[in-house]
Image (cartoon, rainbow, N blue to C red):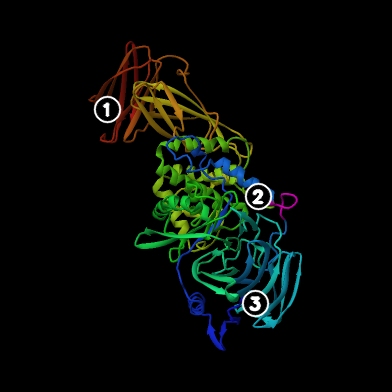
Amino acid sequence: MFSLGITELNTGYTQNGRFCSLLPFHKTLGTLIEIQVNSTSNKLSYMRILFIFLILGSLQVNAQLPAASCKNINEIAVMEQAAHQRIITGPNTITNITSASNNYDVKYYRCEWEVDPAVRFITGKVTLYFVVTTASNNIQLDLMNALTVDSVKQRNLLLTKQHSNNTLSVDFPAMINAGVLDSIAVFYKGVPPNNGFGSFETTTHAGTPVMWSLSEPYGSRDWWPCKNGLDDKADSIDILVTAPAQYKSAANGLLQSETLVAGGAKKLTYWKHRYPIASYLVCFAVTNFAVFNNSVLLGSTSLPMQTYCYPENLASFQNGTQNTLNAMQLFHSNFGDYPFINEKYGHVQFSWGGGMEHQTATFVVSIDESLCAHELGHQWFGDKVTCASWEDIWLNEGFATFLAAFYMENKYPNNILNARRSVINNITSSPGGSVWVDDTSNVGRIFDGRLSYNKGSYLLYMLRWKLGDAAFFNGLRQYQKDTKIAYGFAKTDDLKRNLEQASGQNLTEFFKDWFKGQGYPSYNVQWTQVGKEYVNIKMNQTTSHASVDFFELPVALKFKNATQEKTIVVDNKTNGETFFKNIGFIADTVLIDPEYWLVTKNNVSAKVPDAAAGQNIVQVFPNPVADHFYIYLRKMVANTATINLYNAAGQRLYTRTASLVNGSEYLEIPAQYLPKGVYFLKINAGDFKFVKKLLK
């Protein structure tokens, strides 16, 4: 293995006998390594891998979409889940996900790997800088037993180690006090096992060997020593890959150099990344990549984009990359600055069925438009802000699915309804299932396309509908900027808190029903035409799963006749709730949720006659009156009614004649200019007379 001759220190490096401080950590370390390895290019790719049950079932039916532009989300979901199941050894469960100790905070990884894509084997040196959080003489890392640890060193001092139960335990010769920055170097080698999600793969493309990593959700420990959980991001990383000279190596961050070594037989490629990163987002890939560069203007910043693709697919990637650049500008404008704007974004082709949002270096099987939009969305939701538990994977996958849909709807507006209908049909294909992952030992459950991807995305659709665009997008931008979670980890409660602050609404019931709860509502809407302009609406719902007795939602209702239509919204909170709404015409039908904002199924509506018993029914409310009061005439015998309002002195203040439609009318009477006092309302309708005393 080629080494650059840097050794580890408590608070710095020794280079050629000279001490170099690590404080402040980011800037000094970055400068040091830039001096040691000449920089030749600057581009970054920070992304995580996806199972991509990609978001747009939408795309299967619209002829306006380019035929090769996107995969049906459900097809992608099935493809990726099948790929995932195939590479899991034994039962589809994973236990003992991480055993790394929590007495230290990772600051930096320097990963030096030597590989040959034709051989499933890795030789590595991983240097770990950490701050001890609890005084101790021992730390533990995650590393599978299949790999052999040759040695662990602290400033060239051999340390005592134990490697068992997929845990690397390291003893120090003396106690390390809390708050001290220290480092170790782990030297290891071996054949990575097939565990987790296909974390370390070798295959061929067009007859050429290719190797890649894909560590989500639990696979980092399969091929490198690290913290394997969702609780500690390294502040920065360096990745140095040595491989046969005919190949190119891609990884996270900005390319610094490519140097021939071993007499020209091998090539050392150095990548630098100076943003916090979760261990499962660390990546590399090696083959005979073709490389090309683009850039995209984000505000005043020209962001580099770098693509590593198979030579046989160069033309398709070159032709399709503009779509990703367009999506980048859309997301940057609506969800906040691209999170790794000081570096780059990139695509790296691999042969797995879908994509993986490795930070700044998204791995994709093809340049499929919706797949690439999904993976790009992860840079904000999944990479910058990462779910703090696999229970909350929807904060990664549901968001990326929503962002891809957001992009596709902006580009292909005529396809919106078909796309949304397709996704809802998938979500409601089973009566149960929560977005919250109730079994994080089951990788198939974590990455369930119907629940974590589609239903997760529709929580965001419904929140956007419920809160309105201004509050919704402000809340998401605030969530991205939240100092408690930015470049760190988030739970669903963190999203809820930010959306509540932005909107002023209490979202406890919503998340109880839609995140932890299961199923969906089916609406029964009964409505009665009242006069020429109003409708009386009665809302009822049944739920598909007993975990939720009622879904409180604003529901859109589109009333129509042959020539007119109007959509109104009722904020439905209980069964049997009634609403009077002015639609301005006589309707003959109503459509429930016509734009598919809500997860519902089997909705029905019916126009019904007035069910009140008797004739000549008059309701006046409120009393005392405010700025307005209302008169509801029901089952009147006459065809017209005259309304008069008098003050206590008998002076007529208001008069109106109303034509009755099927014996009914609903009238709004202005009262804002009336002084306080006693008034008398008189209604004449044929032989029927009505008098009521009103107060203001």
569 relative to 493, above or below: above
Q: Secondary structure at mark 1?
A: loop
Of label 2 and label 1, which has the lower sequence position? Answer: 2
Segment tinted magenta in the rendering: 87-94
Which quadrant of the rendered structure holds the C terminus?
top left
Query: Percent position (x, y) of residue 371?
Result: 51, 48
Residue 90 belongs to the span the image colors magenta: yes
Give the dominant element type of the magenta stretch: helix, strand or loop: loop
Determine the residue located farthest toward the top in the rendered image: 687
Q: Is residue 553 visible?
A: no
For disc 3, the marked residue is 184
* Tag of residue 648: 1
Badges 3 and 2: C-beta atoms under 8 Å apart? no
Q: Nearer the viewer, residue 136 or 670?
A: 136
Q: Secondary structure at mark 3?
A: strand
Disc 3 and disc 2: Cα gap in Å? 34 Å
Query: Percent position (x, y) of residue 179?
Result: 60, 78
Disc 3 and disc 1: Cα gap in Å? 93 Å
Q: Nearer the viewer, residue 493 or 411?
A: 411
- Classed neighbour count for the residue bearing mark 1: other residues with Cα under 10 Å, few (<14), some (14–19), many (≥20): few
Tell me what residue is drawn at x 40 percent, y 32 percent.
568
